[in-house]
Image: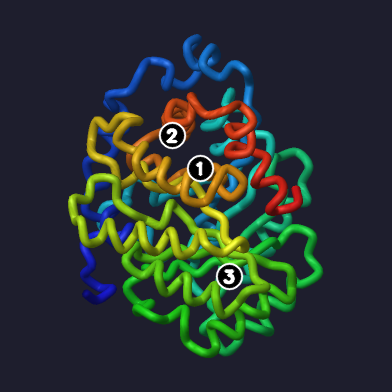
Amino acid sequence: MTATHHQTDRRDFLANTAATAAAAATSLALPQFFTPGSADAAEDAKPVIPIVDTHQHLWDLKKLTLPWLKNEGVQSINRDFLMKDYLESTKGLGVSKTVYMEVNVQHSHQEREAEWVIGMCKDKSNPMKAAVIGGYPHDRGFKKYIRQYEDSNYVKGVRTVLHDPDRPTGLCLEKRFVKNVKLLGKMGMSFDLCMRPEELADGAKLVEKCPKTRFVVDHCGNMPVGSTDKSLRKKWMDGMKALASHENVVCKISGIVVTAPEGWKPADLAPNMLFCIDTFGEDRAYFAGDWPVCRLRATIAQWVGALKTIVKDRPLTAQKKLFAGNAEKFYGI
């Protein structure tokens, strides 16, 4: 099945469902303690677990062009989302540090985006400590581009959104792509795997070819929560197991809330989340907010609350690793 029409593509899902998301986000069938600022929320947070948000999206449309924001279905987030907005949305959640995640800007704006976020990382008045910037390892100019940030204390890695329609199956295994991902490892940078769930096996092959590069699987491998496709689920599970078999791969627990049905509950998210946490182990999985994209289905407070509920029976030491410790270690922040 081609990239252009795969029904489970994450961005396709956003386009198909976000038209009703605004209403859904305000009518989620969640326990009361998910309400931001409620007394129950404060009570549920005890003992307080600090949060490192490893997937903080921000964009200023006066500075950057994000072509995908023009797609049908994402109009509700087709506006500026700045640091002040993030701080307001996460108030009371205990977010102590963040890692910026690139926002798939148009190619010519990648350097502009990188310089913008490096500036924020240097600003001690906000929690941003590091960044994963955009980059195309399949591009002839990638080596020159990424070398600019080799000595940066803030640029920790690179991401290419591999499930976009113009990025075909197998792109990550092309010779130039592999060579440049190996270069990232030599520079001490990681590479984020954000790809279609049925192509995770390609991600595992890339990892095998680049043993000295660290990898991050974004959004639990992008398996939609509501999918009943057993074949797809098996490919996803097999792919995640293959990736987890390599010690240089970690998994972000994020992103899947946007694929949940209207009126979702934590129990709807739990199977995918717990499978990933158990497959990678408590030392190689960590929280990621995916704000403001998560707003298509939930506030970040609702998402944090849901994950806390899902892992509430896990040892406190494991929860602390999930929400902060593993990320601090991985990014050196």
First reached walking from the N terminus: tag 3 or tag 2: 3
Q: Residues within 10 Å of mark 2 (few under 14, many from 20)?
A: many
Which residue type carries mark 1? Gly
Above or below, 249 against 45 in this view is below
Q: Nearer the viewer, residue 61 or 152?
A: 152
Q: Is residue 225 left or right of residue 206?
A: left
Q: Which mark is residue 289?
A: 1
Whether residue 120 is visible to the viewer of this picture, yes or no, is: no
x and y percent of residue 222 in the render? 37, 56
Above or below, 144 against 244 in this view is below
* Residue at numbered disc 3: 110
Q: What colouring method underlies this structural image?
A: rainbow
Which residue type carries mark 2? Trp
Q: Is residue 236 left or right of residue 249?
A: left
Looking at the rendered structure, the secondary structure element under dot 2 is helix
**Alpha-carbon distance for marks 3 and 1?**
22 Å
Looking at the rendered structure, the secondary structure element under dot 1 is loop
Q: Is residue 125 left or right of residue 176?
A: right
Foreground disc of the pair 3, 2: 2
* Residue at numbered disc 2: 303
